[in-house]
Amino acid sequence: MERCLRTTGVALLLVTVVSACGGGGDSGIRLGTVGRSTVTEVVEAPATVSAKASATVSAAADGTVAELAVREGQVVRAGALLLRIDSPSAQRQLENARRADAEAASAGNVSLPAGGLSAQQQQADAAASAAFERARRSATRIPDPTLRAQALAALEASQAQYAAAQARAQDAIQRFEAGLGSLSAALSSLSSAQRVQTRAAVDAAERTVAALTVRAPIGGTVSLSGVPQGGSSSQDLLSQLPESVQSQAGSLLGSGASSTTVTGTLTTGQPVHSGQALLTVTDVSTLSLTAQVDETDVLLVKSGVPADADLDAVPDATYPATVTTIDPAPTTSTRGGVTYVVRLALGRGTSADGSVAPRPRPGMSAVVDLKVRVARDVLAVPAAAVFRDGRRDAVWVVRGGLAEKRLVRVGAQGRDEVEVVEGLKGGERLVVRGADRVHAGQKVT
């Protein structure tokens, strides 16, 4: 991106241009006089019109649209009912999850006899056998193969622990009480692990069923067509669970991912898939601009900098804008350069005839002129008069008809004029065109 250098609002005539002849004919060298003016330095950047907010609503589970409570273009408030989805699969998952949780809870209610010899040992063995059997039935009901295998493996480990404790109890009656304690701890550990998994599954399933009644996340205008694919709602729900059980609950419910997208307009009775985008709600109460500013210019851009925006859709209008934020993180442009996102508040535009310009729509392309520096009533010279001399800027000043190099320090750099902060005085004569044809001591009249 190149910086656009522009001069606006000229207060006084800067220069008086005359011919400078070093012999016969026109040498192409022109002279002028240092004057005062207002110089505006502008950074030009491509931009896009953005809405205040936009939210895409996705299906929480496979099913069909049972009720569509809105129409295309309808304005809704946040929380308003949008649609309801009928999902037998989500209801079945909730029922299965609750049944597995209830069985896991009953499997944990194990009471082992405290003390005794062979009779108590037999009662303990019987109680443990029944508990392990209930735990096995509960584990086999888990629909996810991976999680089911994990639960069965935990059961086998607990049974091995029980067998070891049983052998120790038989070998030493005096340690029987300690053996029973180990058995009880093993069963309690198994029950606790299963309850964490089953409760997480119930919680996620309940949230999925609740999400079948879809409400507007924000206020705005509804669009039922041309909706891009949305993210998985199940993932959003699982993210609200404790990290320790997210993966387990996700495996139990299934990812529910689907690559299906909405084509056409959403209607009642239409089949939908988990994660499928259904509609969007866009808040256009406030419009803004998102500009991409090159890294070479972004340090000049500050919050509050004014700008003018030209929209491709309204070529004869100008829209005022003001910088609100500059993103600290860089992005890579399509041409490989580094740019920074600059956001601007967008005002009401004015057409060339002075009338109010049409209100833009989100997504429209624009070009913004960021007025990064404005120097008013300052010494200024034509931009063509300034050239680089090493690492400094310089001009050719004419004294007594002879050219003399003068180092200067410039400020705001406009497209046509440049502010001179140091090195020149008002009224001095200098070369304003053809500086590359001039050398020190050359006669210029």
Image (spheres, grey):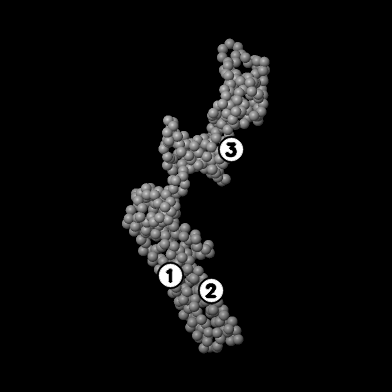
Q: Is residue 164 above or below residue 371?
A: below
Q: CA distance from mark 3 to mark 2?
A: 63 Å
Q: Residue furthest left?
A: 269
Q: Is residue 397 above or below residue 229?
A: above
Residue shown at 67% from the left, 26% from the top: 423
Identify the image quadrant of residue 417.
top right
| Sequence order check, earlier mark of 2 and 1 | 1
Name the residue nearer the viewer: 392 or 15. Answer: 15
* 91 horizontally vs 4: left or right: left
Mark 1 or mark 3, whichever is nearer to me: 3
Residue under pointer 1: 98
Can residue 127 be seen here? yes
Q: Secondary structure at mark 1?
A: helix
Q: Secondary structure at mark 3?
A: helix
Identify the image quadrant of residue 141.
bottom left
Residue type of the residue flagged with mark 1: Arg
Residue 117: percent from the left, percent from the top? 55, 88
Label annotation for residue 189:
2
Label annotation for residue 27:
none
Residue type of the residue flagged with mark 3: Leu
Mark 2 or mark 1, whichever is nearer to me: 1
Q: Secondary structure at mark 2?
A: helix
Residue under pointer 3: 300
Q: Residues within 10 Å of mark 1 (few under 14, many from 20)?
A: some
Q: CA distance from mark 1 to mark 3?
A: 61 Å
